[in-house]
Amino acid sequence: MKRIAIATLGCKVNQFESAAFASGFEARGCVLVPFQAEADVYVINTCTVTARAGQQSRQLIRRVLHAHPSARIVVTGCYAQMDPETVLDLAEQPVAIVGNGNKHRLVDAALEERPPDLVLLMGRIRGKKEICPLPVSRFPDRTRAYLRIQDGCDNFCSYCIVPYTRGPSRSLDVAGVLDQAGVFVDQGYREVVITGINVGKYGLDLAEGETIYSLLDRLCRGFPACRFRLSSIEPTEVNEALLELLAGHTNLMPHLHIPLQSGDDAVLTRMNRRYSRAEFAAVIRRVHEAFPAVTIGCDVLGGFPGETEAEAANTYSLLDELPIGYLHVFPYSLRPGTLAASFGGQLPGPVKEERVRLLRALDAAKRQALYRANIGRVLQVLVERRQAKSGLLQGFSENYLPVLAAGGSRLVRQVVPVRLAAVDDGQPMGIIAEDLLEESRQTR
């Protein structure tokens, strides 16, 4: 019985894929152990979306190689796909490197007795036509499950390495999506996060005639007791069909994450983003007008090559004036192999840091305003765990507020009505609505 340890860096898609590895190992009679424990096989699912993510991937590989010289090391993910030679250079012992297009073969590679074959396990990711089949039986230690419906990207934003590490857009067929959702529901998961690299392009490569909108409709109708949350969707893909789904399905969570990246038209053009400042603003306002209680989050890059003070100010002012609940702020990270890496006007670190600091301060203010706006509302909170520090239950509401409340451990993994009472030291604090909780028990 081999002991397997898995570490995951990066996005929700990586987390789904690591759960698939875990399911595959368990099906082969292996036992999963914490990554800090002694194991026979260590799997590192890497990320390279930013320079820092690549650095973290290298550091983890080095640490495992040094600490466990006799174990079998399997490295996969976007860093392994982008720079397998560096992974090999880090190792003095044989290392299995599994490219993103061959992740369905990772368990076999990890359990092979013979030395790993790099050429066999890599391949040309841009030539992939089908998504890797990676069924998941359960998500270890998680209350919400991630369901990867799509992989790859064809957008080629000038700053982004992902199309080169993930390949073209490829979708899981509808039957596969519904089967995986059914497994999660049967396992007792109360919320499933629909994820992918560019989920809005779901189905366009299939002959089934499905889209992300028809798929969400199928899921919400087919599993009415399960909450579905969309991980991220491009502004060009937020349309009337999506708004109708939000209006028509109470189990589609009122929370949209819509990447912006820049609020300046010239920078958006250099980024190869396919919308303008005005178009993005119109999308956000349309969603907010239709659903004032929907939480909208977005991604933004600070310090893109050539970004002037005026262009940075345009981004800040747009975000400041729009009804956005939170920001994910990243400094621009030069990725060799992308178009933006060849641009002139690469900004010095201190300039990028200051622009990121301002945007993160705006994020903090936006979050506090969002929390305060929800005081007095009864939110449906999926309780995930008991917080060690406070002893309170913690979980996320339907509109993605991180809520703390006092309650019994029996409520963990349950959706509980919580009346938001206050914001204490920046944290939303709620009171479990016992009358509503009793009503919900009686109607089950």
Image: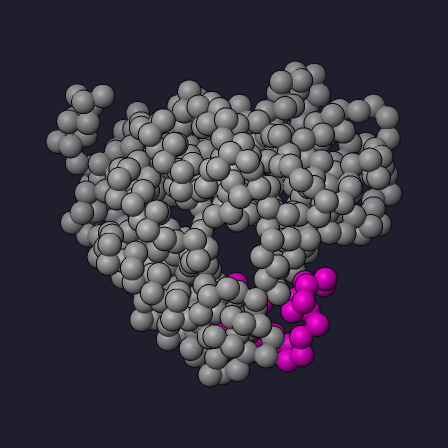
Residue 310 in percent (x, y) is at 46, 83
Relative placement, left or right, of 269 versus 193 is right
Number of residue marks? 0
Is residue 340 rendered magenta in the image?
Answer: yes
Magenta residues span: 330-356
| Residue 70, quarter of the rendered image | top right
Return the x and y of residue 398 as percentages of the image width and height.
30, 42
Q: Quadrant of residue 435?
A: top left
Taking depth in this image into account, of 265 and 85 the one nearest to the observer is 265
Across and down, in percent, residue 347 comes to 61, 77
- Name the side, left or right, on which 92 lies relative to 332: right
Report the residue at 30% width, 36% height from top: 251
> For residue 406, what is the image quadrant?
top left
Q: Quadrant of the C terminus?
A: top left
Q: Residue at x 59, y 46 (%)?
A: 169
Colour pattern: one colour
Name which residue lies at 46% across and 33% down: 145
Where residue 275 appears, as percent x and y from the top left, is 46, 66
Asked if residue 401 can be seen in this view, the reply is no
Residue 231 shows in the view: yes
Q: Quadrant of the N terminus?
A: top right
> Is-magenta flag for residue 393?
no
The residue positioned 67% from the left and 75% from the top of the image is 343
Q: Is residue 165 left or right of residue 175?
A: right
In the rendered view, would you say 90 is above or below 44? below
Q: Is residue 372 left or right of residue 56?
A: left
Foreground pick, 189 / 410 = 189
